[in-house]
Image (tube, grey):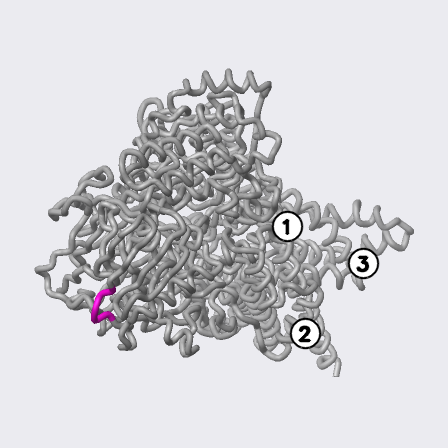
Amino acid sequence: MRLLLWWAGRALSSAVTLLGISVLIFAALRLMPGGFAETILGPFATPEQKAELAVRYGLDQSVFAQYGHWMAAVGTGDFGTSMISGQPVAAELWARLPVTAQLTLLAVAAAVLAGVPLGVLTALRARPGGGGVAGRLLSGLGVSVPEFALGSLVVFVVSRYGLQTSGYLLPAAVLSIFAISATARTTRDAVLNVLVEPHVTAAVARGETPWFIVRHHILRNAAGPVLTLTATITAYLLGGALIVEYLFNLPGIGSYVVQAVGRRDYAVVQAGVLLAATVFIVMNVLIDLLVGLVDPRLGRRA
Amino acid sequence: MRYRLAGSVAALALATSACGGGTAAAPPGTAATGSTAAPGFLAVADDKLPAGGALNVAVHIDSGAATGLDPQLADVATSWQLMSLVYETLVTVGPDFTPQPRLAESWENPTPTTYVFHLRKGVAFSNGREMTADDVVGSLKRLLAAKSVWRGQLGPVEKVAKVDAATVKVTLAKPYTPFLAALANVPAAILPMKEIEAKTLDPAKEMLGTGPFKVQAHRQDVSWNFARNEHYWDKGKPAADSLTVTIAPEEAARVAAVQNGSSALAALGNVDSAAMLAGAANVKVATQATTDFYYLMLNSKNPKFADPRVRQALNMALDRKQMAEVALGGQGKPTGVTPAGLPGACDPATLPSATGGGAAKAKELLAQAGVANLSFTLSIYSTEPAPAVAQVIQQNLQQAGVAVKIEQMDEASWSGKVYGKVPATFDAALSWFAGYADPGMVTTWWNPDVAGFNVGFMQADKDLNKLIAAATETPSGAERDKALAAVCAKVDTDAQMIPLVTRPATVAYRADAVSPSLYATEGYGNLLRLVADARVKKG
Amino acid sequence: MNRTTRVKGTARAKRTASVKGTAGGRRARRLDPLSLTGLGCLLLLVLVALGSLVHAGGDPDAIVGPRLQPPGPGWWLGTDNLGRSMLPRVMEGVGTTLLLSSAAVLVTAALSAGFGILAGYRGGYLNELVMRVVELLYSFPAIVLAILVAAVAGPGQLAAVASIVLVTIPLMIRLVRAAAVAVAERDYVTAAAISGAGLPRILGRHILPNVAGTIAVQGTYALSVGISVEGGLSFLGFGVQPPQASLGVLIRQGGTYMMAAPWLIIGPGVVLVLAILSINVLGDGLRDRFEPRETRALI
């Protein structure tokens, strides 16, 4: 019962957050300088053409009415129509989802498959007194190199040798540098935290094998933060990896939304932001569930 | 990021002269190494190569406007470029900017105000229906009635009439020299009026023309797939079976596409692309001169620039040569209001601002006007090379003791600031026009009553308007050149919209994948103008 | 833009809440050599930035020579595409980037300290409100947020600072709050409350000093995020205004000339990575040195 109440509260607060996001994005778009009419119709447009466009997309109504219509439509699953293409926004988001999803999947898989072992290894080999200079430098470098710098370099150098930059491996690799480094750092810290706990010492004293200790005592207990991080990265990437999409010319969700900001294509930006925020929030809820399953102590604390 | 101004624009990036991989960039207008291009061409497709094959090109922006795909309402060059693959006009422009036959096989000009067009036989739309004189008359009438920017360029058309099944007559109210040049641009394309009137086709949503290609598929901001129009009248064209246009907003992505061969040809924006791509196997970079030019807007409704002496002083302090050399890497040319490169254009070196005495004289003039420590904000959008031009302007004016603060914004904010309010509130702004194909055409935008978009920041000048009208009415020849020179000089001293330098366009292509045809100078920003001639190299 | 903060945050907040009570950890000690090296590099960069104020390397805006020249006398780091010397431009870039990021981080730190401590100590509706706002900012796609801010405020330094603050603040408030919750349960805070100490005194004298470590450590991370955000904004054309140089602007420009004029990207690129790396390494060291075990972060 208490658990149920807790989840109800959680759902309610998520809904409030999404509502806040909707207000924020709606207001911000209308506060932006440069009207949709000048942008979408160009400087030669006559006042009549502008008025026509405004009427067609309901932009002649008061902002409150516009917001109300938008919310009502979203409630029925209608995310509006792009003023640029005249196509439904939901269809285009759906068409772009596979690009974003594949990039995310590859980058996150790399992060988990490479980052976790690296983190465990560096933690187990860490000497008291903070050794592991190389590891710290490398992972520090990994989270430091800006995506746009690394991406530009990779795109240019790889294509210079006639190699294809299409496909998802390269862009995912660019994205995964950060993800791997961050995962390795988190894992290392989480493992170090677990290592000092009494049950690990006890296990060592009992003479259990190192591999058994790692699996049963360390990984299980260190999983929480690593899972949380993985979820955050996943949610972030699902919102669109703008710079990598641009550099590798991948039609993902990030470039769709950002181009729409540039053209004041309101419905697209609103839907994109709402989608990204929903994914982010749902991911967080899911991960709390998952963490609770893996490590019940943490689940109760959430 | 795109820019869409005034009728033109867009981005483009077109082409340039060719320089082979590894050689230094040649000046605009020179022939491509390795191919014997004819005069007026950067490259000529090798018609000994077999036809067929799939051609991939990359451009930086899709056509995208609330007005959709209706060519009559298109006002940016990037849209014209895509639409020109499907739609054709009665006449077209040659490499020397003379009118050439297209859907009209020939024409007569019996009086200065009458044009009689003899339509080509055997022209069909891509649905197989033959084009008729009714399509031609209907299209032109529709354009004249449309809220189209091109309406202002078409001139004083009084009447469009069908003479017989193969003849159409256009009557003007008074002589208008740029008429054929204006007819040669995409907004004057011949539409399938029968289908449009029967409402079986919405030209805003679907393209159906007489051109070499028809649309197979389109995904907004991602790509276009074109297939050959099997009913195309010019047999043997298009040489390629299919054409894919990939939209890649990021320059690095287009450079990569050419380097690895995933695109055979790409429009580039960087004026130093030739140096960038030197050493890339089989990649040729060409710089196409264009009639497009940058201009500086000084808002005369702003008290800072109300005094013409202040504007003239700034104009005098500008170093157009440095702009061309430094900001545009030597690929641009100083220009007056008649675009440098068009036959009959005035010589910018003889203009009052060029002979006026530079920064020192500018200082004197400002002092005479009682202005000390002038400082103003220059609003630009972030698409290169506009920021580079702006920074040279800033350095130039610093020499005359004028402080310029550059304000760089996204295109939408810029448009809002410059066009959004009447009267406008900005100090100064930088942009560019497409220069079109006749030296008198773009001068019309210096008459705010005709142009419309600049009423917020530009004071109409009766004398200038008269000169502009005279230059468009005078038939080509020495007298017209004189009239155009007078417009140039007047615009120069008026100094509300100050022409600066022409805007080069760069194209890179794979010599092992395509043999393209490219004009040396382009007026309508159409890199793909001759794409139907391009031969795909296989293997 | 950078995800560092976000990522760290959740992990950290979670963990913070859960490992309370684990004692001890590494004892306070001097910064390790690596962190000291980081600190040294950072100080060096600050010196360089100060040098640019007096144009120690020359005027960063002046056109001094032919375009795209390799390093040589007169332009020791080469010239850019407008014929400006890269040396003063890189120096100015370091200054701009450090100044903007640190200004933003100070704002973030101050706001986070205020709201985080208050929410953590008082709990209840205030806590709920602060956490909702934080979650809202947190789940808003960072890059769209930054662009909207830049467009609404008008691009420039103010917009860059505001963007960095908005991108870094959700995480820092979460962590400060979590730390404050942990501290608030300690005996000495309870004792102070029982003995009648006022709210400002409890917050200022008892809680703030104990969460200062968290703020300092997070501040260094936020600084590196700030540099990335500034660079990302410039990449998209919303950064500082020309002709002012920032590391983001220089790298963006240099990136397009990678083959033809590699000196355009090598200088600023090396400096940027050096700056972020130094800050991160220093942050790690500070964390090991100052942050109480129970509020340890996990990245």
Task: State the separation of the CA atoms marked 3 and 2.
Answer: 22 Å
Residue topped by disc 3: C122
Identify residue for label 1. C291
Query: In terms of secondary structure, what is the magenta stretch mainly?
Result: loop
Three-letter amino acid code of the residue under disc 3 = Arg
Left or right of residue C185, residue B369 in this image: left
Is B457 placed left or right of B31 in the picture?
A: right
In this rendering, is residue A52 above or below B343?
Answer: below
Q: Sort mark 2 into few (<14), some (14-19) or many (20+) by Cα contacts within 10 Å.
A: some
Q: Nearer the viewer, residue A97 or A226?
A: A97
Residue type pointed to by label 1: Glu
Label 1 and label 3: CA atoms lie apart by 22 Å
Does B121 lie within the magenta span? yes
Chain letter of the residue carrying label 3: C
Report the residue that reaches farthest toward the right.
C196
Nearer the observer: mark 1 or 3; the answer is 3
Which disc is residue A300 wearing? Answer: 2
